[in-house]
Image: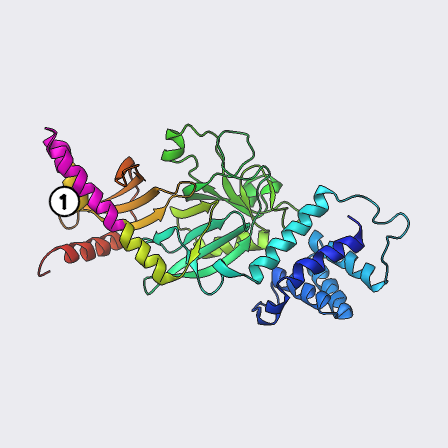
Amino acid sequence: MKPFFRHLLLVTLVFATAQRVASAEVSSDHYESRLLGATTQFISGDWPGALASLDTLLEDYPASRVAHLLRSDLLWALAGRTVPLSGLGTASPTSHVQSLTEQWRLRWQHAHPQGEVANQRVPAKLLRVGADRSAVLYVDLPAARLYVFGQGHDELQKLADYYVSVGRRGYGKQREGDLKTPVGIYRIDGYIPGVQLDARYGFGALTTDYPNALDQRLQRTGSGIWLHGTEPGWINRAPRASEGCITLSNNDFAHLHRILGTTKQVPIIIDDSPEWVFVPTLKARRDSLIAAVHASTRDNAAATATTSNPARALAWQQASGEREFIEVFVYPGHKRQLLTRAIEFEDLGKALAVEQYWRQDENGQWRIMLQQQLPLPSQRKIASESLAIWQKRSPGA
């Protein structure tokens, strides 16, 4: 793309949200905030300041192709050129330049949100996160963004967020080798340091349990869907550049790894249709959905009891009367599916974690599609959760 026209595109994109520039809260030593700070100087007319900022940024991050592209456009503007110099910038737009522009656009939109992701909203699919979770990961695929949420006072709190790159053919993985990132809910089940991997994985990799039970039922294939760093010579890849994994800059991956520590079984929700809502809205939806699921289990138990299957009816009654969901997620890619986690126990101190996939049928009834036992969290946390649930159910406790 000719530098002058790249410059026009940049200015057009920025001025659409330029009124929010002054309110951006960024860290002075963070790569992304410094890049966007130089952009702000550029569009506000402080071109010498922008050039100085970019030069300093490139001293620290010489592999930043986005910064080099922005600097070339800035030099073109400083030269007062409206047509390319002979032999320079004469090529038609390339996919590489377009991908760099798209990466910049996604970063800018995240820093200057409009509507849904602004004003302390949270992902609508995270209806309830288990009290035993120190963190939950959420990937907003259209925004190319990974969020880390913790919990405080029974509410989600954002701990960090990062620009990410996903599959070069997009998302919605169905088969091995389709170069797509899966959509669904998975768990981080391991960490591999970079020294044990090929250089393209950068700092290291967090492995996931793709394909999960639902994927296997739907005959989705493939494996090795990881979160990992970036190879030498790059800060970040284009928004769609991996073979299906979710990739971060090495600095961001190291920061994420420090947050998670040695914790395993961290949920990661990979969402192709994100919705962001206020916390009161989230709680209202959660309560409504849980009530609907419990009503369905009671209805199913009653219906089963009239069809000469008392054992199954008893199972439905136990499901509705003896189960408290400690975790509830709306399953991405399906408007009428839930993933729940519950602690079941026969008596105090005997706990069992159960994961269930639910689907709402055409009559509005929620039904279990799949169920599996999960590894238990620490016994201390299980005991505290079990006690809380037991006391909630036991009159006078």
Q: Residue furthest right?
A: 86
Relative to the observer, which residue lies in front, 354 or 308? 308
Q: Quadrant of residue 281?
A: bottom left
> In the displayed structure, does residue 101 sit left or right of residue 198?
right
Q: Which residues are magenta?
A: 290-314
- The verdict on residue 291 being magenta is yes
What's the residue at 18%, 44% (across, down)? 320
Mark 1 Cα-neighbour bin, 10 Å: few <14, some 14–19, many ≥20:
few
Q: Is residue 119 above or below residue 148?
A: below
Relative to the observer, which residue lies in front, 347 or 322? 322
What's the residue at 49%, 29% (across, down)? 175
Residue 12: % across, % down: 69, 59
| Residue type (three-letter) at the residue carrying disc 1 | Glu
Relative to the observer, which residue lies in front, 178 or 304? 304
Residue 127: % across, % down: 34, 53
**Residue pointed to by mark 1:** 346
Residue 339 seen = yes
> In the displayed structure, does residue 197 sit left or right of residue 51?
left
What's the residue at 71%, 52% (across, down)? 65
> In the displayed structure, does residue 254 sit left or right of residue 14?
left
What's the residue at 66%, 58% (across, down)? 13
Residue 193 seen = no
- The verdict on residue 20 being magenta is no
Residue 134: % across, % down: 37, 56
